[in-house]
Amino acid sequence: MLDTAFCQLHRLVWTAIVPLAVFSVFLLILEEFLTQPAIAYAVSIGLTTSTLALFLYFGKRVRWSFNYTVSPLLIVVLGLAIKIAAFVLFPVNFVSDSATYVSLANQLISENSYQHGNTYAYWPPGYPLFLYVSHLGIIPVSTSTIFIQNCLITLIASYVIFQLTHKYHSRRAAIVAISIFTFWPTGLLGALDAYKELPLMTLLLLSVYLYTQKSGFKYHFINGLVLGFCALIQPGTILFVSVFVVLNWFKKLHFTNQLSLFVCLLAGMLSAIAPWSYRNTQVFDQFVMISTNGGSNMYRANNEIATGGYIAKGAIDISHLSELEQDKRGKELAIEWIKNNPVDFFYLSFIKMTKFLGDDSTGIYSILKRSAQQPIGEIPYYGLKLGANTFWLLLWLIIFFCREKLYSLITSDHLIATLSLSFLYFFTVHSVFESNAKYHLPAIPMFFILVAILIAEIVETFDNG
């Protein structure tokens, strides 16, 4: 009975998310040009309704087909060539979070220490440590080394995407998946910047591969190590293991097996995280698992002046406190505000959902505006941003067209359920914490595989008449 309720809930969530995503794309575009929110909402609802209806109408009248005999190597090489051209044409400087992470990595390389200003664990250590190791502890991190590293990470992710999709479904689906990932606009430009999300998404993809394709306690322990490294990069992924716990229950494994597998995952995670936790204990003389920024982040995302996205400080400024006090006080203030303002909290959560679902132009903004040595003009910028979001919108429209197949697969197929819950995990987390386009990046490979399988299914249906 519980598993039936879970399947129905899972289906209901996707029934709501797909039109919400289409609505959000239109809303975020219109909000940049319309000053009246009510008008933006009304026009977005109209555009969403008409777009879904038109896509459904024409989708049934177009023959879905593509050439899946093309070499995956050719696809990857074309993507790499575009990245190299972008690297030459659009030189960047590291700014904002990227600059901080690169600075911390270079500090580890030159001084063997980890400190930013007066903080010792505010910034999660995973990405700087990753840069330190990938640069052999001696090579300074630069735009060139970051680009080379990101290209290699993308190649690894492409290989895992192809193998996972091919083994599970078909070569057809694998070609579609790797094509979407390779020519994804944010991915093409994102390789130029120090994005922690690139190694994070690859590690999470590897985790999903290990869970779905490998069995045995050894592989679950290794998977736990991978998840532990993910948590060091982004502490918000520390509960991602819950996806596998739910799936083990969904697969109706014996309770003893479920418990054993969970213990293996947990042991692997603790093995990866424990050395840093020990370091923090030595620094602060109290237990700090990974970082001290959780409380302040939670409060900035949940207070009376919160916007759903990034703001420098909440209604009450706690920046004068020590990092440990900020962490503690931030959590207290956030929880207090949520309890006292449930209606505002749920409305704010809705805003966060639209920011999470409605934009996929992070790479365009980051490389061509924020980090660019020579930012491009407004007209080409908005043109490229519109192109990136049209790509994103098309993927959601495909899911809408294939929704009945999706509903069937998420309730009967364990890989599809894994891909789905991986995306929904980040959607849920960032309905509470700060949200914007970059926060769905860790789940992007799983989302693309899901779309590719749906496309392959619909093409097969057309081929079979």
Image: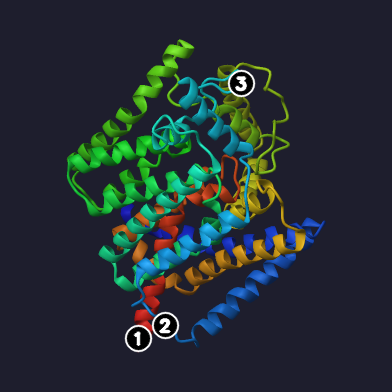
Label 3: which residue? 117
Q: Residues within 10 Å of mark 2 (few under 14, many from 20)?
A: few
Q: Which amino acid, mark 1?
A: Asp
Instruction: Please report the residue visible at 82 percent of the width from the left and 56 percent of the height from the top.
Output: 35
Q: Which amino acid, mark 2?
A: Ser
Whether residue 219 sits left or right of residue 21 in the image: it is left
Instruction: Please report the residue visible at 40 percent of the width from the left and 70 percent of the height from the top.
Output: 176
Earlier in the chain: of badge 1 and badge 2, it is 2
Tell me the tag on residue 40: none
Asked if one can make out residue 403 in the rendered structure from this viewpoint, the answer is yes
Q: Are marks 1 and 2 in contact (CB under 8 Å)?
A: yes
415 vs 102, nearest the viewer: 102
Tell me the tag on residue 65: 2
Q: Is residue 150 above or below residue 298?
A: below
Residue 302, percent from left and from top: 64, 36
Q: Residue furthest right?
A: 35
Q: Which amino acid, mark 3?
A: Gly
Asked if one can make out residue 6 in the rendered structure from this viewpoint, the answer is no
Label 1: which residue? 463
As helix, strand or loop, the secondary structure at mark 3 comes to loop
Earlier in the chain: of badge 1 and badge 3, it is 3
